[in-house]
Amino acid sequence: MFAVEAKNLKKTFKTKQGDVEAVKDVSFQVNNGEIFGILGPNGAGKSTTILMLTTLLRVTSGNGKIQGLDVGQDDSEVRKKIGIALQDTGIDNLLTGRELFFTTARLWGFSKSDAKKRTLEMLDLVGLTEAADRRVKTYSGGMKRRLDLGLSLVHKPEVLFLDEPTTGLDPGSRRVLWEEIKRLREDGVTIILTTQYLEEADELADRISIIDNGLVVAEGTPDELKTSIGGDVITFIFHSYEDAKKAKGLVSNSEIENNELRTTVENGAERIPDLLNKLSENELEVVSVSANKPSLDDVFLQVTGYRLEGAADTEEELIENE
Amino acid sequence: MNNSNAPFLLQLGILTKRLLLRLSRRPLAELPNIFISAFFLLVYDGALGGVFGGSAAGTPFDFAKGNFLNFILPVSIVSASVSGGASGIYLVEDIESGVFKRYQGMPISKWAIILAPIVVGAVRVLLQATLIMTLGNLIGADPATGIWGYFAVLGMAFFWGMGFAGYSVAAGVRSGSSQGAQAATFLFFPALFLAPTFTPRYALKGWLETAAAYNPTTYVLEGMRAIMIEGWVSDLILKGFLVAGGFAFITLTFAVLSARRATEKS
């Protein structure tokens, strides 16, 4: 049995401008104990997919299962199995960390004494023991995210959904959160993580599903995805966009972005001299050239046709307007 | 994994306690509201007590039977009931901050989530009513029904406050903003003043007397006044309780239906 299954999930929002398909067809399976990354730009359908799987949004068609339980039919049981830390789940800023953990534990059915014990455990787990009696409004962004993560773990869920857990955090706080997420995997928690950070997906995810425009466009381990491109990525930097554009006509299977031209070839280092000669013969001066193994960025570019940065941000607006 | 979850009443208790804790964290936002009705009791008595109080004995203005405080105290109590309107704001604050969504993702009753702010609103009304009655008692209010009369007034205030709480929750959920919930409480003003607020109904001008006859506030005021001035006059008191209870029932139903629509998965 898979920890999580999404089968042909589809979500259509009705708006004043007409129907909008936020998720067109998303399927994946997540094994127990793995970190599964859903990578994509804002508006790709990541958050909508998570909201459907966590019972917070009705599925238009298709189905989802959590530990074999049907989303939409066994919602109450599904909620007991999962922990949720969404981008827009709130934290009561007027209460302290200790009060929030205690209240959450009591709502999950812990007795008073067990709730006190669990509160201490959770404060320790997310490194907030010292700040336990401070009101949350005095916490830093990183502390709030750790608190949010902790609150989603109070009832010891089997599956944890994290929707862009590090968005807006500074690099230091991001690293701290990454370590906590890895530790949870070691404890056997299955984690579904959405992110728009390639580095985050590469660092954390055992497997990745790339979602674009409501569709799964690639899936595999980070290494599988990188290998799927084949060869090495050679990057030429020119003085101008015009030069890069001219070079594109000379180098097959290449993409340009500003004054950069990239191409993927077998044995990249060996091909560089030939390519440089060809460009030179056409009076194109190369500022710098490099050959690297493909990154997730390259994978993303190949499967979507654009780079991850700067994509449109419409999904959250649609969900909010529902 | 923890497989159980708290029973409904415990959930309601925990969520109510959380909201009360929130209120205690911003006393400056809450205290003026709590004292304002008590302040108006002093002002009304100071401004009108001379004309309609003991000196009115034997004149057509003697509707307070010599103690204008007994007549005007219910006005302060009823005006305090608007503080039940804060309930909608508490709920909308939770919706706006995303706390509501966090609870939706847990296997807890959505009714507990919705009822908790209503209970807090009612507690606020009770607190204010108690403060007003204590002040009234100190400065000379003297219910014809004795100490139990105060409890009866408190009971009626509780239902009336629940009514306003339910109304504001419905308005808040439907408007989806705390400003919307706040704006909806302005209904209170016509409700309070298109009623026999400062004089009995028979002394009102024709149009206002007609409006007052259709205004439920009238029957709550008259019920409370019967307790304070006349004694255990069952028909007026019963009418007051029925109207307050009916108002609470209608607005709570309205709140529940509105909330059901808002919390249903889209």
Image (cartoon, grey):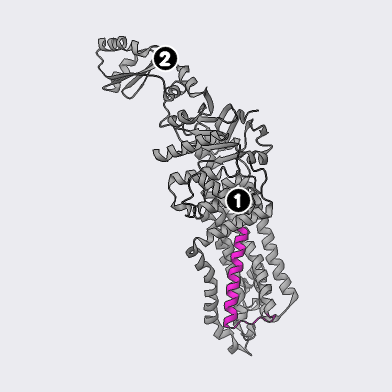
Please tell me whether residue A121 belongs to the stretch shown in magenta: no
Disc 2: which residue: A231
The kind of residue tagged 1 is Ala
The kind of residue tagged 2 is Gly
| Stretch in magenta | B117-146
Q: Residue furthest right?
A: B234
3D distance between C-alphas at marks 2 and 1 = 55 Å
Marked residue nearer the N-terminal end (2 or 1)? 1
The numbered mark 2 sits on a residue in which chain? Answer: A
What is the quadrant of the C terminus of chain A in the image?
Answer: top right
Instruction: Tell me residue B214's x, y (percent).
Output: 66, 67
What is the quadrant of the N terminus of chain A in the image?
Answer: top right
On screen, B2 above or below A295? below
Please tell me whether residue B118 belongs to the stretch shown in magenta: yes
Would residue B48 appear left or right of A287 to someone viewing this image? right
- How many discs appear? 2
